[in-house]
Amino acid sequence: EAQVTQNPRYLITVTGKKLTVTCSQNMNHEYMSWYRQDPGLGLRQIYYSMNVEVTDKGDVPEGYKVSRKEKRNFPLILESPSPNQTSLYFCASSSPGHQPQHFGDGTRLSIL
Amino acid sequence: RKEVEQDPGPFNVPEGATVAFNCTYSNSASQSFFWYRQDCRKEPKLLMSVYSSGNEDGRFTAQLNRASQYISLLIRDSKLSDSATYLCVVNIQGAQKLVFGQGTRLTINP
């Protein structure tokens, strides 16, 4: 089954404790992306990757890092999480042309 | 000004009604346009692309007005299962990114 898998689905943690949200896709897509979704602001792109070892900043990259060592994986790293990073996070992938974007189930992060 | 703007709603309409949403975009380099649907606490899913000539998919009709920089979605004979948030999405030419509107929340009432 074609899918994008994010882990964990839910995480409550404390300020400053490094965390990684994993994202994996099995569709051999070149393009992968991370978004955060906040009430009233919609989905905002954090980082994206056009292919292996190619990553670039989206609209809200501050406080986040990513890596793309393999085509299927695109982890999101919060080196020192802060409460303003409490949000719902989605990973997505697509073939060139960006449509349709296949989204993971989402990760709800709470930073206390 | 937001790059993609939608009326957040919520819209509450009776089952069987026709409902329409608009979405405006500010970047004239916007190249392609889409409507996504997002159910509560779920991931967004592509509903339909929006073509320059307008396009229809069953009860759903999408239209694009490049001169005025807006796109629309029309839902006819609405069903209870149409209750969701509808996201307007724009692909900016050359920017390699998608810009999402904040979404319009729709509730269909029996």
Image (spheres, coloured by chain):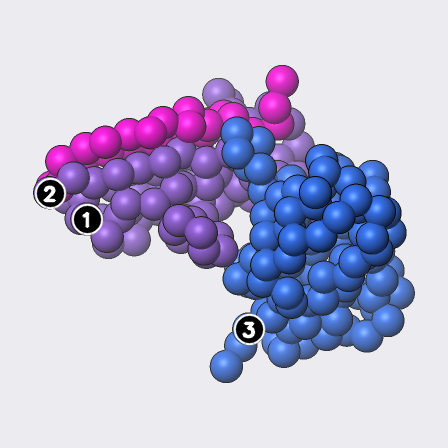
Chain colours: A blue, B purple
Same subunit: marks 1 and 2: yes
Task: Please name whichever residue, A17 or A25, is drawn nearer the observer in this view of the structure.
Answer: A17
Mark 2 or 3: the one toward you = 2
- Provide the residue designation for mark 3: A3
Give the CA distance from mark 1 to mark 2.
Answer: 7 Å
Measured as percent of width and height from the top left, residue A55 is found at 84, 56
- Provide the residue designation for mark 2: B110
Give the CA distance from mark 2 to mark 3.
Answer: 34 Å
Mark 2 residue type: Pro
Quarter of the image that includes the N terminus of chain B: top right
User: Hey, which residue is sitting farthest bottom in the picture?
Assistant: A1
Query: Are the residues flagged by discs 1 and 3 in contact, CB closer than 8 Å?
Result: no
* Residue displayed at 53% across by 34% down: A39
- Provide the residue designation for mark 1: B80
* Left or right for A46, reference A9: right
Q: Secondary structure at mark 3?
A: loop
Give the CA distance from mark 1 to mark 3.
Answer: 27 Å
The vertical placement of B28 against B93, above or below, is: above
Q: Secondary structure at mark 2?
A: loop
- Structural crowding at the residue carrying mark 2, measured as other residues with C-alpha within 10 Å and reported as few (<14), some (14–19) or many (≥20): few
Task: Please name whichever residue, B72 or A45, is drawn nearer the observer in this view of the structure.
Answer: A45
* Residue displayed at 53% across by 62% down: A105
* Residue displayed at 87% across by 51% down: A79
Q: Which residues are magenta?
A: B1-24
User: Hey, which residue is sitting farthest top in the picture?
Assistant: B1
Q: Earlier in the sequence, mark 1 or mark 2?
A: 1
Measured as percent of width and height from the top left, residue A87 is found at 62, 44
* Left or right for A98, reference B85: right
The vertical placement of A18 against B50, above or below, is: below
Quarter of the image that includes the C terminus of chain B: top left
